[in-house]
Amino acid sequence: MLELLGRRWVGMVLLAGQRGARRFGQYRAFVHGISDRVLTQRLRELEQVGLLERQVIPSTPVQILYAPTARGTELIDAMQPLFEWTARNPGALDKLP
């Protein structure tokens, strides 16, 4: 799990899904600076390991939503103290190589 969470943008993508199902564009708007290609990769990876669920809504146009699974929600809850620490300590990691 640490290997997955260590990948760039994974934590932010998980955090973006914290409040329920979102469309691709909503994830992109939340995760500033991520490219469409990388966001697609991260969403697929999180889906493959069972942390996100992809929902296809048959409408015109077709809507695709990504929502955390129960396991994903549990992981987000476990990561919450880390997100809060990061918010309280902006720039704390700026000196990393």
Image: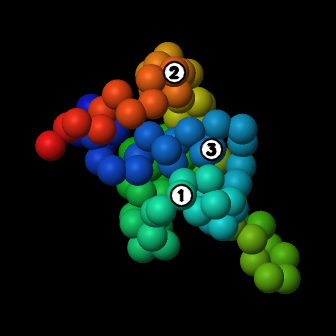
Q: Which residue is at 72% across, 38% downward?
A: 19
Instruction: Identify the amino acid type marked 2.
Output: Arg
Secondary element under disc 2, as helix, strand or loop, is helix
- Give the image location of residue 58, x and y in percent: 79, 73
Instruction: Identify the amino acid type marked 3.
Output: Gly
Q: Say which quadrant the C terminus sits in.
A: top left
Q: Residue furthest left?
A: 97
Badge 3 vs badge 2, beta-carbon distance below 8 Å? no
Badge 1 vs badge 2, beta-carbon distance below 8 Å? no
What numbered label is drawn on residue 17? 3
Label 1, residues with CA under 10 Å away: few <14, some 14-19, many ≥20: few
Numbered-mark total? 3
Sooner in the amino-acid sequence: mark 1 or mark 2: 1
Badge 1 vs badge 3, beta-carbon distance below 8 Å? no
Q: Is residue 8 positioned above or below 36 on the image?
A: above
Q: Determine the CA span between mark 1 and mark 3.
A: 14 Å
Q: Which residue is at 80% across, 82% downward?
A: 61
Q: Which of label 3 and label 2 is nearer to you?
A: 2
Secondary element under disc 1, as helix, strand or loop, is loop
Left or right side of 43 for 19: right
Q: Nearer the viewer, residue 85 or 54?
A: 85
Q: Determine the CA span between mark 1 and mark 2.
A: 19 Å
- Give the image location of residue 84, x and y in percent: 53, 21
Q: Is residue 55 visible?
A: no
Q: Which of label 1 and label 3 is nearer to you?
A: 1
- Give the image location of residue 50, x and y in percent: 46, 43
Q: Which residue is at 20% across, 37% downward?
A: 96
What numbered label is drawn on residue 88? 2
Q: Which residue is mark 1?
A: 32
Q: Which of label 1 and label 2 is nearer to you?
A: 2
